[in-house]
Amino acid sequence: MTANDREPTRTWRPQIEPSTVLALMALAISGLGFYRSYIYTKQDLQVTVTEVSYVTNLGELYMSIAFSNGGNRDAAVLRVEPALWNADHKPQAAWVPLIDRVHPNIPVTAPRTPLTVKAGGVEVVTLSAMLNAAAAEHSFLASQSGTFLGIRVATMNSDGNLYLLEHAVARLTLDREGHIQGAEPAIHKTLSGFEDLQVAPPGDMLQSNKKTPFVWADQHS
């Protein structure tokens, strides 16, 4: 076959127009968006404690918690509570919620729960509760040389599954007389909001990092 014989074959090959390529790309992107929005499901709620402050001599406890939804479905935060570890709780030791307000006009949880964390969004919840210093010192855990503050979080994903998270967030250190002298973090990581997790003191044992909350407490005078 000569070069002249092959020439018609080369001429016959169809040429794809740029507009056709763009239309196919747009169709593919649209299909991917439809799949991610209506078919593919990603449930991802992250819980990060950012601050713990105990105004010891006034008995005022404040916490800030960030809920970050990295999924493509909304998440529900049903309840968030500050808690104190009570080793004398019957029938076994447990995290006991702190429910007394620091002021009649200030709710324990703000914004109030339940609340929705939109897909791709972040919600910051502040907790404000009374904790009498004597009561905190009475909850001293000798094996860990301190009193532990924690959080209790109840969540629900878009499938209707329920989860309970309990974790230590701070340790109140005591002096030889048994009085509070300061505080230190008992958590150094972000927690999964869609996991059943009950962590007793002393919390996690990781090194301080960018996930470690700011923690402080006044010395009990």
Image (tube, rainbow, N blue to C red):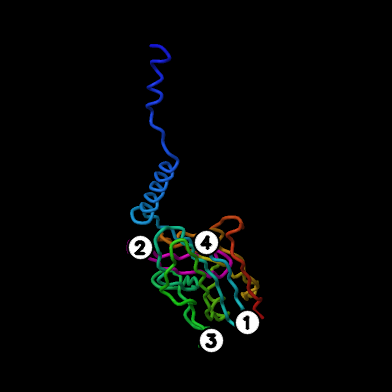
Q: What residue type is disc 3 on?
A: His
Q: Which residue is mark 3?
A: 103
In the rendered image, the residue lying farthest to the bottom is 104
Q: What label sits on residue 158 in the rendered view?
A: 2
User: Cα distance, mark 4 to mark 2?
Assistant: 29 Å
Mark 2 → mark 1, Cα distance in angstroms: 43 Å
Residue 41 spot, x, y in % from top left = 37, 55
Residue at horizontal 56 percent and vertical 56 percent from the top: 205
**Nearer the observer, 44 or 207:** 44
**Residue at numbered disc 1:** 57
Quadrant where the C terminus lies?
bottom right
Q: Residues within 10 Å of mark 2 (few under 14, many from 20)?
A: some
Mark 3 vs mark 4, foreground winner is: 3
Do the residues under discs 4 and 2 have CB atoms within 8 angstroms? no
In the picture of the structure, the residue carrying the numbered disc 4 is 203
The stretch of residues the image draws in magenta is: 143-167
